[in-house]
Amino acid sequence: MSKELIENLFLPDGGPYALSSAMAARSGSGKTTLLTKLITDSRKNPKFKETRFIYISVKEEHLFGPEVEPTADVGTALKSMTENPITVFYPVDSEFYEDDVDSIIQGVFALSGAKRKKKDPIPSFVIIIDDANILKGFDSRGMPSPSVKKLAIAGRSKRIRGMFITHRLGNLPRLMNGNLSALVVMNINPMDNDYAKRIFGVDFDEIIGELGEYRWAYVDLLDESIHKYNPIEPVEFKAKPKKKSKRFGVFS
């Protein structure tokens, strides 16, 4: 995976590419494998030394191996972000998904603005919201919560980036259309091609038949270029002894 692609997708450095990004992928398209690879590779890049990732999944998808233990507590998740490069958060109840996501976003903005000594490194953050289309108001005609709007619009200046993962590009709220620098598309709905032409000025006609079966494309929305990629190999994590979790059972 190229360093430039990963930096354009995730690096919260305040530069022109430091807007949020979106991923559109239908079930079974290989989204989990790809996302794990992208984030794992970013951790090998020195530019991400002070970057903290938090992955929020209402479906409790686990991406990063046994060394990253999920939490369902917002406070624990935010504390983890001050200590660990990757945090996985599972909302306790899907009915409160919006509240939990808002609390995480507000907490990350607070962490970003916290006072620190001059010699302390400046942290940056990436908030990845899986199944964002479940959030109230997260559709082309809706209005997401003030916290989600703040992430999409104001995150760049605070060294905070968002990645919004949906099943369709058409799920993206209109206010985000001008606040994204990149897309990742996989096995998308053909209707999304018309949406991409109309909203983003990009045309998937030549590649839409080549997507799927774990093939994917990266779309640079700043220059409207499309880059195709073949399937990637899953990341292998070292196993550790099984450990029971009070809430989430066994991870191994």
Image (cartoon, rainbow, N blue to C red):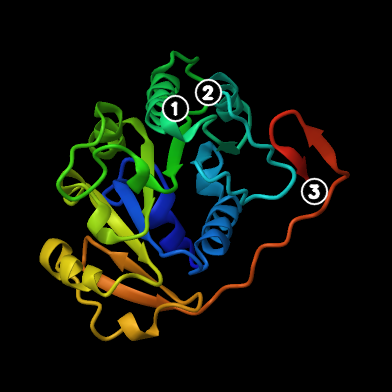
Is residue 13 visible in the rendered structure shown here?
no
Mark 3 neighbour density, 10 Å: few (under 14) some (14–19) many (20 or more): few
Q: Are marks 2 and 1 in contact (CB under 8 Å)?
A: yes
Asked whether, in this view, residue 201 is left or right of residue 139, the answer is left
Task: Say which amino acid is labelled 2.
Answer: Val
Q: CA distance from mark 3 to mark 1?
A: 26 Å
Residue at 29% x, 46% y is 19
Residue placed most toward the observer, 79 or 120: 79
The dot on residue 100 is 1
Residue occupied by mark 3: 252
Q: Secondary structure at mark 1?
A: helix
Could you tell which of marks 2 and 1 lies nearer the N-terminus?
2
Residue 215 tag number: none
Residue 212's spot in the image, x, y percent?
Answer: 44, 77
Q: CA distance from mark 2 to mark 3?
A: 23 Å
Q: Residue 119: give x, y in percent of width and height.
A: 52, 21
Q: Residue at x 47, y 28 (%)?
A: 122
Amino acid type at mark 3: Ser
Q: Which residue is mark 2?
A: 74
Outermost left residue: 198
